Image (cartoon, rainbow, N blue to C red):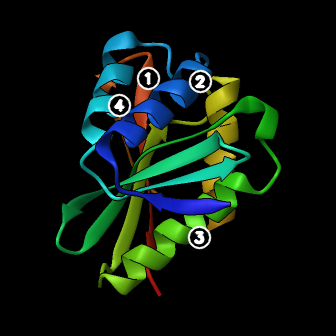
Amino acid sequence: MVQRITDVKQKENISTQILESLPEWFGLPESTAEYIHCSREMPFWADIENGKARGFLALKETSPYTAEIYVMGVRKEYHRCGIGRALFEHFHSYAKGHGYSFLQVKTVQEGHYKEYDQTSAFYKRMGFRELECFPTLWDEWNPCQIYVMSVR
C-alpha cells in the first residue's frame, strides 16, 4: 500500500534499502548518497507491505510550474507488479493538487543500457514524452534524457 512518508529518518532508511538493492540503476556511490540525502527533505511516498518497503518515489520542485520525479526505485522482485504505477499515481495526484502544470523525469537515453531502456519504457507507459537529450550533462556514457508531461 502506498503511503506518504514524512519522517526524515524513515525516508532515509527506505531509500537506502531500496537503492542499495538496485545496483544496475544506482551503482555510483556518490550519486546514490546524494539521492538518499536530498530526498529526505522532499515529498516522499513508499509502497509498504507487512512492514517492508517495496518501492518509493521522491518529488522535487524544479520550478513553480514543474514537479520532477527526483528518484524512484522499486525492488527488482516487485517489478511489473503495479507498484511503480501506484507510486506514480500518488505523485501525479499530489502534483495536480498543488497546482503544477508539468511533470518531468531524467534518465539515461534509450539504446545505451538494457535496464534504462526498461525505465524509459515505464515512463512512456505513464504518459511521459521525450523533451530533450543532454549528451554530456552527467557524462558521455550516460546521456541524460528528459521526459515531460502535462498535468491535467
Answer whether labels 1 and 4 touch (C-beta < 8 Å): no
Residues at marks 1 and 4, CA–CA distance in whole angstroms: 20 Å
**Is residue 29 in view from this perspective?**
yes
Residue beneath label 4, please?
36
**What residue is drawn where x is 66% and y is 63%?**
86
Q: Position of residue 115 (x, y in %)?
A: 67, 28
Q: Residues within 10 Å of mark 2 (few under 14, many from 20)?
A: few
The residue labelled by disc 3 is: 89
Looking at the image, tell me whether mark 4 or mark 2 is earlier in sequence order: 4
Mark 3: amino acid: Glu
Q: Which residue is mark 1?
A: 142
Circle 4/circle 3 CB separation < 8 Å:
no
| Separation (CA) of disc 4 from disc 2 | 25 Å
**Percent x, y of residue 133:** 39, 42
Which SS class for mark 4?
helix
Residue at image location 48% in from the left, 66% down from the top: 91
- Seen in the picture, residue 63 relative to 59 is either above or below; the reply is below
